[in-house]
Every structure is written in structure tokens, then in C-alpha cells.
Amino acid sequence: MARVLTNPTFEEWLRHLFDHPVTNPAWYWEEDLDAAELAPQQVVAYATRLFEAAGELLAPYSDAQANDGLWFLIGECTSPLYALSDPAVPLAERLRCIHAISTVFEQCFVPRCTPHLRHLDEDGAGALNGVCYMWWDIFPVGGVTQEAAPREIASAFLAVMEETLQLPSLACQESALHGLGHWARYNKGRCQSIISAFLLHHERLRPELREYAARASENHVL
């Protein structure tokens, strides 16, 4: 029988996200799924705490467990992070949470993802490459909601993509380009500027990634 965790502690919330056997389909598709009930401001606070210490807090979990938990946290169908669009949550707290996403990429995805391109479905990709690649595609603040996003929110997301594009990781670079490709629909000039600067300073990219960057610049990504 499903349980409802009302106002769980941060540690209980972490276990709710990550302490599951790896199954197919993933644990969060179970009909009697346990639920964690938190106010929007608390969701943002917990997510910020997780993101800012992602390397340490996710270390006890396998790549597959981390992938599933992060997918549930940010997935557009299940995500509690719709709280980032809640005007009742102070803007400064929402912006801190968004900027902390850079640390997830730096501390977790850089050391744990493998150098495979997910948009080409290359064989041998690690378990965490999935959520890394799809991060900006499934994140609950994106797509048409960008039209209504406060300017500061949109600017923060684009800044994070720009930062992660500079990380020494094929998986992180591909993820950032994937995100910029989607956001180019509403922020074409800014996204093209970020991608152009990246290409200018990274002459030795794999040809496949350079081609993907060109497509992203024109909002031609899936």
C-alpha cells in the first residue's frame, strides 16, 4: 500500500528519490507509488540542497539509481520542481536553485557520464547519460512556459546551459546544446551567441557534435 510522507526530512526525501532497486519500468511508474508531500518553497529548498552537494549526496547510489531519481525529480510528468514556476516562492530562492544545477553537471555528470552521444544512440553509454542528455528536454520549466517565465528565470537557465557547455565532458556539452536547441525557439539570438562562442573556442570537437551544435542553433533538435 502506498504511503504519504508528509513534510519528510531532507534525508527521508533523498531516500524517497534514490533508494530504490533499479527496475524496468522505473520505480516511479508503480501504481501504488509512495508520495512525498512538501510545500513548494520546501521543494525548492530541498532541491537546492541536493544540487549544491550533488557529488557527495549522490555518491552512495549507483549510476542507474541516480538516473532514475533525478529523472523523477525533473521529469515533466512527475516533477515536484514545477515549484520553480510558483510566484509564491521567493524569486531569489528559485534563482539559487536554478544556478545550483551547474553543480549537478560538474560534480555528478562530468565524472560519472561516459563519452557517448545520446542523440546518436551510441552503444556503451553509461546509465547516467540518459538524464544528463534529456535534462533540459524534460525539465518542467521549458517549452511554451518560457513565454511566461520571468526574465530573471529565463536568464538563469540560459546561464547554466552556457556554463555546462564549457565543462570538459562530451555528455555535458551535448546536454547543453540539446537545451539551447529547444530554448532557441524563444531566445534565438542569445542561444546562437552562446553556441557560436562555444564553437569558436572548441576547434577540436567531434564532427558529430559540431553538426549537432549547428542544428541546435537553428532550433532543429528533438
Image: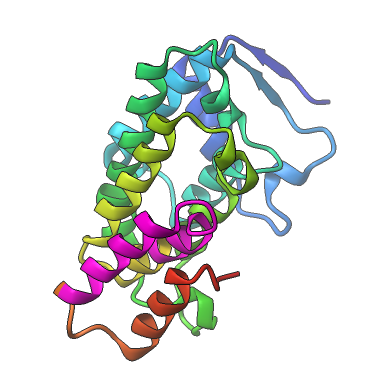
Left or right: where 125 falls relative to 72 = left
The reply to whether residue 19 is visible in this rendering is no
Position of residue 48 relative to residue 130, above or below, is: above
In this rendering, the answer to whether 19 lies above or below 128 is: above
Residue that sits furthest to the bottom in the current view: 207
Task: Name the one closer to the observer, 181 or 44.
Answer: 181
Residue at 33 percent across and 90 percent down: it is: 207
Q: Quadrant of the C terminus?
A: bottom right
Where residue 12 sits in the image (x, y, percent)?
A: 51, 21
Q: Position of residue 185 (x, y in %)?
A: 54, 58
Left or right placement of residue 17 versus residue 170 in this view: right
Residue 123 lies in the magenta stretch:
no
Rendered residue at 49%/54% (across/down): 183
Q: For the image shown, how many numbered marks are present on the structure?
A: 0
Magenta range is: 176-200
Relative to 215, say whether 43 is above or below. above
Which quarter of the rendering shows the N terminus?
top right
Left or right: residue 113 compared with residue 134: left
Q: Nearer the viewer, residue 28 or 178?
A: 178
Q: Main secondary structure of the magenta part?
A: helix
Residue 4, located in which quarter of the rendered image? top right
Q: Nearer the viewer, residue 105 or 59?
A: 105
Q: Where residue 115 sits in the image (x, y, percent)?
A: 34, 76
Answer yes or no: is residue 93 visible: yes
Residue 170 location, quadrant: bottom left
- Name the residue rendered at 42%, 23% in the picture: 94
- 142, 28: nearer the viewer: 142
- Residue 181 % position (x, y): 48, 64
Colouring rule applied to residues: rainbow
Name which residue lies at 39% across and 42% down: 157
Looking at the image, which residue sits at the far front? 189
